[in-house]
Amino acid sequence: MDPMNRAKELIERQIPDAIVEVSDLTGTRDHVSLLVASDVFKGKNLLEQHRMVMDILKEEFSQELHAVQIKTMTKEKRMNS
């Protein structure tokens, strides 16, 4: 499976209410940008939110992804932006 689709699938499996958008930053499919919106991030600071996402991805993609840009937010914030 394509690493970008796999990343989306893993996040959605671990954070069931997540809205996940994955973009290829360089055309090589190993530098990706992730936008993850979920209510599970409520009350968590940015570092905690990013750690949650990286913990989901780290084992699966330790060799496949060279760089990951993460943007996290609550669903409410996504609706208002």
Image: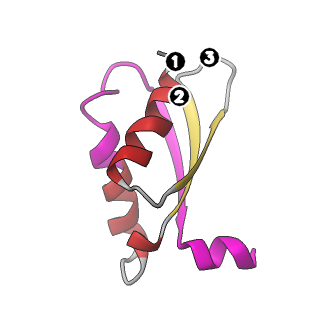
Q: How many marks?
A: 3
* Residue, disc 1: 2
Q: Give the label, 3 or 2, closer to the camera.
A: 2
Which residue is found at the position 52% from the left and 23% from the top?
30
State the mark number for residue 26.
none
56 shown above or below 17: above
Depicted 15 relative to depicted 42: above or below = above
Report the span colored magenta. 54-81
Q: What element carries label 3?
A: loop
Quarter where residue 47 is shown:
bottom left
Residue 46 found in image quarter: bottom left
Q: Nearer the viewer, residue 71 or 3?
A: 3
Residue located farthest toward the right when viewing the structure as drawn: 81
Magenta segment includes 56 = yes
- Relative image position of residue 67 (x, y in whole percent): 48, 33
The C terminus lies in quadrant: bottom right
- Return the x and y of residue 70 as percentages of the image width and height: 52, 51
Residue topped by disc 2: 5
The answer to whether the residues at label 1 and label 2 have Cβ atoms under 8 Å apart is yes
Q: What element carries label 2?
A: helix
Sequence order check, earlier mark of 3 and 2: 2
Q: Cα distance, mark 3 to mark 2? A: 14 Å
Q: What residue type is labelled 3?
A: Thr
Q: Position of residue 11 (x, y in %)?
A: 41, 45
Residue 28 marker = 3
